[in-house]
Image (cartoon, rainbow, N blue to C red):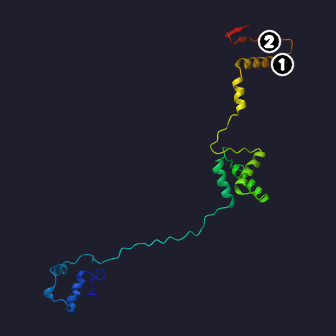
Amino acid sequence: MAGSRLEKFGTVFTRVRDLMRSGVMQSNEKPIWYDVYKAFPPKRDPLYVKPYTRVIVKRPDLVPEIFYKEDKVRAKFYEKYGPSPRVFELIKSSHVSLSQKFVDKYTELQSQSELDETALFNETAKALLKQGILLRRRGAQPTVSAVSADAVEKLNIEDVWTEQQSASADSAETQHGDTQTDTSPSVDLNTSKTTE
């Protein structure tokens, strides 16, 4: 221990002391600080203590990630169609979400046919459409057909007004009988005057 130059084995004071005891170092060769250190020793010995480093070993997870076959179909459904616009009814235990209906139909069609995934996905959407379930693509806005837009442009407000007046007159006649005459004021749309 006396010949070791590493700080790990004792302090400098203990090494010098041991060298003097063994006769390797003479008392006239001792360092100046030796007598001071011996007269006033520190409260704690300045020992070299290896700092404790906690070794962190990353262990693999014992629980693997769980994926079911329908999770892939459900993820593709949400990617294409997005979340359902309807709210889940958690009170009713029989409530089935739109994605679950899609997955059920997908597995049913998968067991019946040998189509690839994309064709089977499209066939499932068509089958749900036949059942009356409308799937809207993610971000798609409901479109107005060109026929209905043309019909709206051709509407004349005067024609609508006269049709409404005649319909209300017909309903009044059927309620009160044919003997009463219509006494409601008529409006001339061109002049905006009411005639009695």
Report, in whole angstroms, how far the alpha carbon at label 1 lies from the one at label 2.
Answer: 12 Å
Nearer to us: label 1 or label 2: 2
Query: Which disc is residue 41 wearing?
Result: none
Q: Is residue 91 left or right of residue 180?
A: left
Front-most of residues 184 and 119: 119
Front-most of residues 99 and 124: 124
- x and y percentages locating residue 106 in the rendered image: 74, 55
- x and y percentages locating residue 102 in the rendered image: 72, 52
The answer to which quarter of the image holds residue 166 is top right
The residue that label 2 is drawn on is: 182
- x and y percentages locating residue 42 in the rendered image: 23, 76
The residue that label 1 is drawn on is: 175
Q: Judge whether 2 appears above or below 72 on screen.
A: below
Q: Is residue 19 left or right of residue 143?
A: left
- Mark 2, Cα crowd under 10 Å, few <14 / some 14-19 / many 20+, is few
Residue at left offset 19%, top offset 79%: 37
Front-most of residues 176 and 98: 98
Tag 2 secondary structure: loop
User: Mark 2 is on which residue type?
Assistant: Asp
The answer to which quarter of the image holds residue 150 is top right
